[in-house]
């Protein structure tokens, strides 16, 4: 039986949600939360989302979507355009390359993978920023940002997994 | 029953993965190209940034509202808890300020009479608009805000952004309905300042930490922690005397300044227009004349 138009639209809408959720992460990351000292160490939520969907449903977050997310993040945060795009593409590439490793692994292993991958991403972004501004940027805030991002991974990872089970199970 | 892949799928799969790999490499190259373009042609990339910021500004505006309301409620509860202490403190402050008021009245009268003698030309009066902060672009690298006011509200590039406490930063780029503020803590921020007590000129340079540094201070100048730092008005970017911060520490490695403004409390800011051209001259097209035919 051929699916009806509504069914196809439903599937399409569901399949767009990983991209949509990643986009939402970009916006959440720049909201003024008015928490003292938070802005400088605001977690890298888009990175977290790209990592998660890159492992579990890479076909729903294709490479050009990752590029787009990175560019948007650069433009909105006032960073040099292209830097976060490179970092996110790097994370995406590593995750795709290691897909066999991650397949069927427990949540703890995925989290451990995230601590490594995001450390690499932090170092890469520090190098790119320092090279762009031709100065050594103080890495203190970046370190705490990294810790906070890693610490928040279980929460968002769990949220995304629930989302997958609820909306992306049958396609 | 097993489904054997048809020849076309068998052929298509590796091509698809190859294409995907090329797409990845191509996009990384494109991102690097954009970075270099941004370094070489700032105007083009900044315009692109303005257009995108303008487009998403309404979204940010709406999304940031509930957070602002929550903050108001939290603040009110907190204030209610501390109302007695606050009252005592305010009474004490009032007594002190009344003394200051007397001094200020006397000085004002003296100033007026002296100006009359000297034929003094007064500074231009500042006009300002108040705008809401709709995004605080967090992160370890860039320190900037997005405001929900742009060219339509006559915000201009290079204008000073303040709160009641002191200087926040300057307008770095303007779109039609949103503008970006470069905070004084950003790596790219350089503000001409003076140390108020000694009148020593210096540059306040942001370094992506919470405490920007004073650089290019004269060798002879003596600075002690606790000195007030205000804008100097040199370079024509900012007017003179806007409060910036307090000298926090003096060491061989550098002098750091604690800004008066706390970043997390920025909710509404004032954009000041002193009619100054500033160090960021933007070539204005001559066709855009603001004289409508009547």
Image (cartoon, coloured by chain):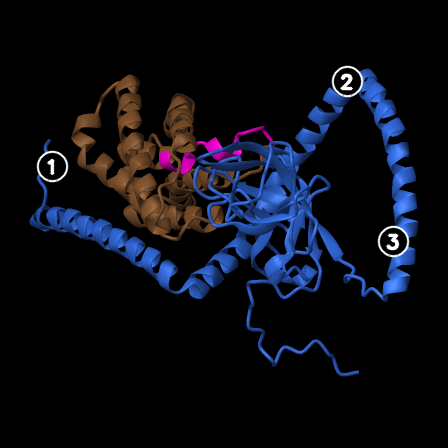
Please tell me which of labels 2 and 3 falls first in the chain: 2
Q: Residues within 10 Å of mark 2 (few under 14, many from 20)?
A: few
Please tell me which of labels 3 and 1 falls first in the chain: 1
Q: Position of residue A59 (x, y in %)?
A: 27, 41
Q: Secondary structure at mark 2?
A: loop
- Residue B117 is covered by the magenta coloring: no
Q: Which residues are magenta?
A: A34-47
Query: Is residue A20 depicted above or below B248 in this figure?
Result: below
Query: Is residue A18 depicted above or below B129 in this figure?
Result: above
Q: Secondary structure at mark 3?
A: helix
**In terms of depth relative to the viewer, which is nearer, A123 or B225?**
B225
Q: Which mark is residue B3?
A: 1
- Distance, label 1 to label 2, CA atoms, is 73 Å
Q: Position of residue A137 (x, y in %)?
A: 38, 40
The image quadrant that residue B43 belongs to is: bottom left
Q: Position of residue B166 (x, y in %)?
A: 68, 42
Q: Chain B is shown in which shade?
A: blue
Q: Residues within 10 Å of mark 3 (few under 14, many from 20)?
A: few
Query: Is residue B225 depicted above or below A154 in this figure?
Result: below
Q: Secondary structure at mark 1?
A: loop
Q: Please give the count of numbered marks on the rendered protein.
A: 3
Residue at (57, 60) in percent of width and height: B175
Q: Nearer the viewer, mark 2 or mark 3?
A: 3
Q: Residues within 10 Å of mark 1 (few under 14, many from 20)?
A: few
Q: Which mark is residue B111?
A: 3
């Amino acid at each position: 039986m051929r699916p009806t138009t509504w069914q196809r639209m439903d599937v399409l809408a569901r399949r767009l949600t990983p991209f949509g959720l990643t986009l939402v992460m970009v916006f959440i990351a720049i909201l003024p939360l008015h928490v003292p000292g938070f802005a400088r160490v605001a977690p890298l939520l888009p990175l977290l989302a790209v990592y998660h969907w890159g492992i579990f449903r890479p076909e729903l977050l294709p490479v050009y979507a990752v590029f787009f997310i990175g560019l948007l993040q650069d433009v909105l945060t006032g960073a040099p355009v292209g830097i976060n795009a490179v970092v996110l593409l790097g994370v995406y590439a590593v995750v795709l390359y290691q897909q066999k490793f991650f397949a069927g692994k427990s949540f703890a292993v995925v989290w451990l993978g995230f601590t490594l991958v995001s450390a690499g991403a932090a170092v890469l972004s520090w190098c790119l920023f320092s090279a762009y501004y031709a100065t050594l940027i103080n890495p203190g805030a970046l370190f705490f940002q990294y810790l906070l991002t890693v610490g928040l991974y279980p929460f968002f990872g769990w949220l995304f997994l629930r989302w997958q089970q609820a909306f992306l199970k049958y396609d | 029953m097993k489904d054997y892949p048809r020849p076309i799928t068998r052929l298509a799969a590796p091509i698809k993965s190859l294409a995907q790999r090329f797409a990845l490499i191509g996009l990384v190259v494109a991102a690097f190209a954009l970075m270099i373009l941004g370094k070489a042609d700032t105007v083009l990339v900044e315009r692109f940034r303005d257009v995108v910021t303008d487009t998403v500004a309404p979204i940010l505006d709406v999304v940031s509202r509930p957070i602002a309301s929550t903050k108001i409620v939290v603040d009110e509860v907190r204030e209610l808890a501390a109302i007695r202490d606050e009252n005592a403190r305010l009474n004490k402050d009032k007594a002190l300020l009344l003394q200051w008021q007397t001094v200020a009245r006397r000085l004002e009268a003296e100033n007026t009479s002296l100006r009359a003698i000297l034929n003094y030309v007064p500074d231009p009066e500042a006009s300002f608009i108040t705008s809401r902060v709709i995004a605080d672009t967090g992160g370890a690298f860039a320190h900037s805000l997005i405001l929900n006011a742009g060219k339509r509200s006559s915000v201009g590039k290079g204008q000073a952004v303040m709160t009641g406490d002191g200087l926040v930063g300057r307008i770095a780029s303007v779109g039609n309905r949103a503008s970006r503020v470069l905070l004084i803590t950003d790596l790219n921020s350089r503000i001409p300042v003076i140390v108020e007590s000694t009148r020593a000129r210096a540059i306040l340079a942001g370094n992506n930490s919470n405490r920007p540094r004073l650089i290019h201070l004269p060798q002879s100048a003596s600075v002690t922690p606790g000195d007030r730092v205000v804008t100097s008005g040199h370079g024509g970017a900012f007017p003179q005397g806007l409060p910036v911060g307090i000298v926090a520490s003096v060491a061989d490695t550098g002098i750091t300044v604690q800004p008066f403004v706390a970043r997390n409390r920025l909710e509404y800011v004032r954009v000041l227009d002193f009619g100054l051209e500033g160090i960021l001259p933007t070539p204005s097209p001559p066709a855009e004349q603001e004289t409508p035919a009547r």
